[in-house]
Image (cartoon, rainbow, N blue to C red):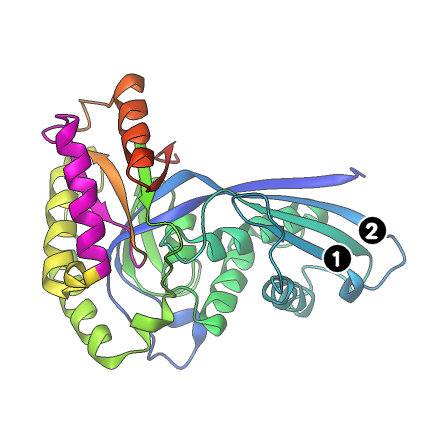
């Protein structure tokens, strides 16, 4: 038996979505919408602590993207372990040492909670080799819904690449999604010291109504036909329309942030080649190519990255995760 079980799960960005959380069963709650999986995300390492120990005595340590230990983060993952044991995907022994390392900030729309859960679940699947992968994803979706930390991120991660969520819910339950591979470098940009918890919006009836109306409208215009590279222009158009019609783009902090990012992009004269899209629901954005056949060069990526830093923004060059 191997001594260590590792996994890596990329983050997920939602470009537009609906809020559908009225279902009685958590596995049927979620969102419809479109999003992008990115290469940077969460790395997990899992090893046996005591072969005769109780799994409840496992040690769980999480580190943020700056390498600092995150306090009170273990409860989130202990809920996952409890559900895996209940589903008989794990036994009550042994105990484990679990290390979770985030590569992106939390509460900025990068789905670090979902990626962390899926990462830990997949590491446990490597250890136990029990059940099928969809069972693990369904449990991760359930934990996300219990904690109010996400709606469709687990379903989006399950699809991979550039994804469309056609029906809300957990993978393998009511959730239905498609994804296509798309090798493209992108840049994630965010406002330091700023964070927005998803529940602020999805638990507010006014925001929920605005978001869902705009999300349904955007999805209905894009849901038919093949899901492949030919849809890129429509994805960019509908994500822009959603931001306007949901009014999320008009929140003061987001508007100021986007104005700054646009000013920086214009200063590099790259505005014809890129599109700036909000990452739901942070004060953050992703720099995407206008056309998939015009990939940003390494020099252009580095130029943008350095300009963002000069203006006090944080950013990272990553790619769409295939």
Q: Position of residue 235 (x, y in %)?
A: 16, 45
* Residue 274 within the segment the image draws in magenta: yes
Q: Residue at x 62, y 68 (%)?
A: 79
Which mark, by number, is residue 43? none
User: Which residue is depicted at the point 43% across and 77% down?
Assistant: 25
Residue beneath the point at 15% across and 29% down = 267
The x, y position of residue 254, in whole percent, is 22, 56
In this rendering, position of residue 141 left or right of residue 230: right
Which quarter of the rendering shows the N terminus?
Answer: top right
Mark 2 nearby-residue class (10 Å; few <14, some 14–19, many ≥20): some
Q: Is residue 275 magenta?
A: yes
Locate residue 212, reporting x and y percent: 20, 69
Which of 322 and 308 lies nearest the eye of the viewer? 308
- Element under disc 1: strand
Relative to residue 240, is residue 32 drawn left or right?
Answer: right
Rendered view: 28 above or below 38: below
Residue 221 in sight here: no
The residue nearer to you, when weighing 63 against 307, is 307
Q: Position of residue 57 (x, y in %)?
A: 80, 64
| Marks 2 and 1 close (CB-CB < 8 Å) | yes
Q: Looking at the image, which is closer to me, 293 or 167?
A: 293
Q: Earlier in the sequence, mark 2 or mark 1?
A: 2
Dot 1 corresponds to which residue? 59
Specify the segment rendered in magenta: 253-281
From this viewpoint, is residue 259 visible?
yes
- Which residue is under mark 2? 49
């Amino acid at each position: 038996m191997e001594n260590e079980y590792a996994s890596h799960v990329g983050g997920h960005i939602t470009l537009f979505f609906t809020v559908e959380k009225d279902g009685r069963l958590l596995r049927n709650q979620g969102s419809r919408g479109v999003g992008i999986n990115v290469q940077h995300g969460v790395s997990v390492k899992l090893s046996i602590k005591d072969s005769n120990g109780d799994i409840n005595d496992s040690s769980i340590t999480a580190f943020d993207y700056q390498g600092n230990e995150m306090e009170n983060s273990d409860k989130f993952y202990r809920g996952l372990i409890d559900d895996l044991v209940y589903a008989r995907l794990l036994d009550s022994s042994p105990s484990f040492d679990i290390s979770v390392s985030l590569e992106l900030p939390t509460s900025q729309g990068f789905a670090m909670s979902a990626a962390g859960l899926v990462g830990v679940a997949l590491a446990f699947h490597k250890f136990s080799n029990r059940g099928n992968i969809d069972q693990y994803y369904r449990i991760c979706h359930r934990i996300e819904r219990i904690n109010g930390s996400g709606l469709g991120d687990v379903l989006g991660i399950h699809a991979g690449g550039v994804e469309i969520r056609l029906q809300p819910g957990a993978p393998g339950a009511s959730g239905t999604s498609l994804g296509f591979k798309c090798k493209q470098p992108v840049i994630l940009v965010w406002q330091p010291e700023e964070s927005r918890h998803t529940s602020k919006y999805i638990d507010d009836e006014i925001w929920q109504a605005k978001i869902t109306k705009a999300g349904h409208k955007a999805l209905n215009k894009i849901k038919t036909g093949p899901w492949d590279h030919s849809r890129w222009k429509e994805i960019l158009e509908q994500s822009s329309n959603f931001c306007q019609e949901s009014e999320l783009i008009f929140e003061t902090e987001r508007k100021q942030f986007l104005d700054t990012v646009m000013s920086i992009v214009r200063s590099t004269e790259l505005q014809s080649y890129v599109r700036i899209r909000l990452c739901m629901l942070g004060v953050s954005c992703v720099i995407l190519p206008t056309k998939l056949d015009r990939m940003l060069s390494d020099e252009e990526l580095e130029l943008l990255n350095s300009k963002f830093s000069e203006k006090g923004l944080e950013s990272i060059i990553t790619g769409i995760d295939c």
